[in-house]
Amino acid sequence: MEILGIGMPELIFVIIIALLILGPKDMQKAGKTIGKFLRNVITSDGWKLFQQTSRDLRTLPNRLMREANEELEQVNREIKSAASFPDPTRSAPVNSRPQPQPFAATPAPKPVTENNSIAPVEPVKKDTESDSQNNA
């Protein structure tokens, strides 16, 4: 058992030294004064803040790992939803298959008339420069 970083053998040694220096009557007064001081320290808001901060620092690595894992899972879900690949482990419902469409006859092509005809294509002209270079 440790109290403020002092083990049991050290505490007994300090009490024996204090008893020799102060004596039995002054030892009671010193004990009472030290007890009041420690009670005031432990019940103070500063001590509670110190304890809370100490707990937070001890649990900080676990909390950070948990938050990082949650963020990673969220990003993973977003990537999967954005990719929207079908999941091979899940079977598609029967109603999700496309229904066959009834056969529809295509309309007959319209006869070509003069108004609907396409303009004739102009022949491609060769460059005269390339002809002159070929002739040279």
Image: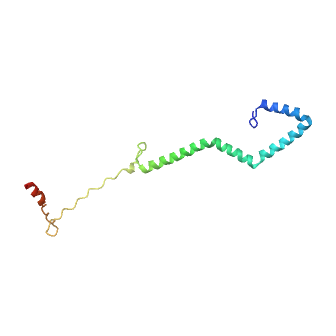
Quadrant the C terminus occupies = bottom left
Where residue 108 appears, as percent x and y from the top left, is 19, 62
Number of numbered callouts drawn: 0
Q: Is residue 112 left or right of residue 65?
A: left
Q: Quadrant of residue 68?
A: top right
Residue furthest to the front: 136
Query: Which scheme is used to colour this image of the protein?
Result: rainbow
The reply to whether residue 29 is in sight is: yes
Residue furthest to the right: 25
Q: Quadrant of residue 11?
A: top right
Q: Is residue 99 left or right of residue 31?
A: left
Quadrant the N terminus occupies = top right
Where residue 43 appears, as percent x and y from the top left, is 78, 47
| Residue drawn at point x = 38 percent, y = 51 percent | 96
Where residue 52 appears, as percent x and y from the top left, is 69, 46
In the displayed structure, 58 sits above or below 78; it is above
| Residue drawn at point x = 44 percent, y = 50 percent | 81
The reply to whether residue 126 is in sight is: no
Q: Is residue 116 left or right of residue 13?
A: left
Residue furthest to the left: 135
Q: Quadrant of residue 102?
A: bottom left
| Residue drawn at point x = 65 percent, y = 43 percent | 57
Residue furthest to the top: 9
Where residue 10 appears, as percent x and y from the top left, is 78, 31
